[in-house]
Image (cartoon, helix red, strand yellow):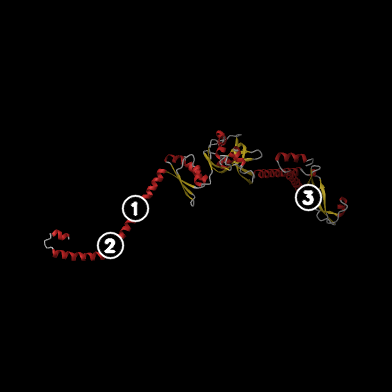
Amino acid sequence: MVGNLNHIIDQVVKDKGINRDVLVEALESAVLSAANKKFRNTRDLEAHFNEEIGEVEVFEFVTVVDEVVDSYKEIDIEEAREIDPDVEVGDSLGMMMEAGSFSRIAAQTAKQVIIQKVREAEREGIYNEFKHRVGEVVNGIVRRYERGDLIVDLGRAEALLPNREQVPRENYRQSDRVRAYISEVKMSAKGPQIILSRTHPGLLISLFKSEVPEIAEGIVEIQGAVREPGSRAKIAVVSHDMDVDPVGACVGMRGSRVQNVVSELRGERIDIIPWSPDIARFACSALAPSEVSRVYVDDEGQALEIIVPDDQLSLAIGKKGQNVRLAAKLVGWKIDIKSESRALEEEQESEKAEEPAVEDAEAVVAENDSSAETVEMEPSTEAETADVEIVDVEIVDDSDAAPDGEQEKS
């Protein structure tokens, strides 16, 4: 407890990265705790670090009284004036105690408090450093596996790469280097917990930012990225400069830039797509490399019906629906893909379903028209029939020799 502590404090601050004031406060608290334990909290004590001599000084404070009742917290006026001639009754008198008078147990208590304070300060410092780094990509060294989770050493702290955030076909050994995305930083009872991810789309975006200068400078902007980790990914880019091709900038000379990203993601296939404000055009690009014949847009339901040539249907859907699934996630709309032959069949079926309805309607109209004509013609028919009968009577009277057929014909 005795000696110049300035050198020790400076060394701990340098090694642990702890604020000096925090460490000094921890020392004062530790010494005060040891002193209170020695005197069983019967005295009013204070501890202060003396920067000049590099020691923690302990002061005992007592109240000046005429008649002492509590000898631990009060002092007689005459005895007090021997220490300070100007003291008066009611004043608080502070007397420095010998730090070396602490027992071995008290010193051990002080040591434990210092270690605890240093540990807490170190944890707080790590948390404050990494809580603002969420979204960054960091490099670390694999230390060990714990129930499928990976413990990664980041230098000042250890991070956790959970099993759910690992790509299924990626395997790591101890001392392997790993590059991961900081997805979350939280404070727990055991200290700060840094969660890493190898499956987050942010890893793909961060890798392109580090590989493509145009993205880092803001000339090319990433509008969205989706992944099925370890298999395939799609990223939409747009250029704010008419002279810069966003897709070409991301691909690089002979594919060098995108190839570096693919290598980091262990062979994950990446589709780079030009973004467009036109949702139909953007959806057609998102379904690359397949071709699209036509697109029907439903703005209210945010759905797209896309017709593709028959030979392009399997390419548009992808393996187990992967291509269209990623395209729908990237666009943010529901996508329904049909082949041209299937779309034609549905059109013909719908036309056939409409034809009987049209014929029934025409039949109903015709029936209505004929009944109307019959109703209108009934009166005139009776009149004509009467006239014909009169004419027949006259014809029969005038020509007796007429053949029966002609008369019947008349």
- Looking at the rendered structure, the kind of residue marked 2 is Thr
Residue found 18% across the figure and 65% down from its top: 391
Residue 299, x across and y down, in percent:
49, 51
Name the image quarter holding residue 342: top left
Name the image quarter holding residue 24: top right
Judge whether residue 341 can be spotted in this image: yes
Q: CA distance from mark 3 to mark 2?
A: 123 Å
Give left or right: position of 109 versus 319.
right
Residue found 39% across the figure and 48% down from its top: 347
Give left or right: position of 168 versus 101.
left
> Which label sits in the foreground, 1 or 3?
1
Closest to the observer, 7 or 220? 220
Q: Residue furthest front?
A: 398
Q: CA distance from mark 2 to mark 1?
A: 27 Å
Residue 189, x across and y down, in percent:
64, 46
> Which label sits in the foreground, 2 or 1?
2
Give left or right: position of 409 versus 143.
left
Query: On the rendered image, what quadrant is the N terminus found in?
Result: top right
- Looking at the rendered structure, the kind of residue marked 1 is Pro
Q: Is residue 47 above or below residue 361?
A: above
Judged from the image, the secondary structure of the residue bearing numbered disc 2 is helix
Q: Do the numbered discs 3 and 2 sit on residues whose CB atoms are within 8 Å?
A: no
Judged from the image, the secondary structure of the residue bearing numbered disc 1 is helix
Q: Label 2 belongs to which residue?
A: 374
Query: On the rendered image, what quadrant is the C terminus found in?
Result: bottom left
Q: Residues within 10 Å of mark 3 (few under 14, many from 20)?
A: many
Q: Do the numbered discs 1 and 3 sit on residues whose CB atoms are within 8 Å?
A: no
